[in-house]
Image (spheres, grey):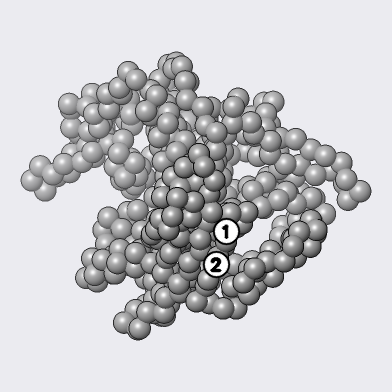
Amino acid sequence: MSAYNELIKNFEKIRAYMRDFYVYGFKSRTEYDKKSARLYDDERRRMESWLGDHMQFVRTPEGKTMFLSIDSRLSEHNPLYKAWKAKSFTDRDITLHFILLDILHDSNEALSLGEILSRMDAYFDGFAAPMSVDESTVRKKLKEYITEGVVVSEKQGRQTLYRRAQEMVLPEDTEALHFASEICPCGVIGSFLLDKYPSHVDRVRFKHHYITSALDSDVLCALFEAMRQKCVVTVKNASRREEEPRENRIVPLRVFISTQNGRQHLLAYQPDFNAIKSFRIDYLSDVTLLEPTPRFDELRAELDRMQAHMWGVTAKHRLHKDEHLETVSFTVKIADNEEHIVNRLEREKRCGTVEKLDEHAYRFTAQVYDINEMIPWIRTFICRITELHFSNHTLETQFKRDIETMYKLYGIGEVSE
């Protein structure tokens, strides 16, 4: 399929379309009511040009439904990275780009803005209607390239000199880079670096390949920069319950990434509630860095202390308040030669403890902020649990009722208290 040529300037818009169309469930042409049907068709064709090899469809009574189908055994690289590699240039942009990089081709030669403008004139000689470029435009373009790391500037007296940045020497072995590009946060950076290699052999395959976080790379990068600078940010937080995203003023502290589903959460301090709260990063947008905060180290230390009682991403609701911890305890029975169950308990216990009661019984105990986060994990031991207690009696009752309902479906006896 040939590439769709209408490129983009605002990635946040394409990020929203890709989530609506593919990540959270593809919307049909009739269901999409945010913009016009023509705009829907334009955006669909754009994404098909990037993801055409991974798109499938089925016909239902409601019409044709599209979806992504990616086999991680066959696809070594995240196909969503293609969206980041589509850029929009005007004729002037691309002309100025090649002229500037040609003038600054020697990274050892530093030139002033005046010298760059003087040399630029030679490129337009011989044209009946040469393109005119003013000093302000060139200065802005150089500033943009300095931000991107393509050009570096240095002061010589009152004068600013510009030169091309030294090119990075890439290692010969690409396996570590390939692995990092698919696993690490902001892995799209590794994907860009891999593109600089003329050819490389992919030897890495992924059993669990969580690709949708690629769409959140710009948000994640901005949050990491905020943490590096220890500053406050404003960020828009979308919600399925509200039409418009809500703007929050927060202090980003840490990013938590689930190894079970790949979902990324930001743990951040929210002054309005005096609490450390969790935000899903795929719901965040428009991160704006503000002033540094002197409380950053104090708040991060508090979060680190809280992690002793965090099973997932739920922390206590307010700082400087008495902690309300919930206790969970359950006993599992194992048969002979089932040490792998004990090993799994030890490996997955997180903030809990495992106690050996006898040769065939082990007790797991934990104090956490929210037992509800643990329920999916506890359910995986249902056939082996002989005793279970929650300090949250409402949750314990609901848990046992769910098991009783399941037992009735399969004609099994009642659950013992």
Image coordinates for residue 276, horizontal then vertical, percent: 39, 71
Residue at the spot x=34%, y=41% of the render? 148
- Up-down relation of residue 327 to residue 145 (above or below): below
Residue 294 is drawn in which quadrant? Answer: bottom left
Mark 2 crowdedness (10 Å alpha carbons): few <14, some 14-19, many ≥20 = some
* SS label for mark 1: strand
Which residue is drawn at the image coordinates 8% and 46% (left, top)?
157
Q: Amino acid at mark 1?
A: Ile
Q: How many marks?
A: 2
Q: Is residue 181 above or below residue 226?
A: above
Q: Residues within 10 Å of mark 1 (few under 14, many from 20)?
A: some
Residue carrying label 2:
388
Q: Residue furthest left?
A: 157
Q: Which is nearer the eye, 118 or 241?
A: 241
Front in this rendered view, residue 32 or 208: 208
Q: Quadrant of the N terminus?
A: top right
From the top left corner, tell me how far across and down residue 377 is, in percent: 55, 56
Residue at 29% across / 67% down in the picture?
Answer: 305
Residue 222: give its label. Answer: none
Q: Is residue 77 visible?
A: yes
Query: Could you tell me if the residues under marks 2 and 1 are in contact, i.e. CB atoms within 8 Å?
Result: yes
Residue 283 in view: no
Q: CA distance from mark 2 to mark 1?
A: 7 Å
User: For the point 70% across and 51% down, which residue is it?
Assistant: 25
- The residue identified by callout 1 is 385
Q: Could you say which is closer to the camera, residue 113 or residue 31?
A: 31
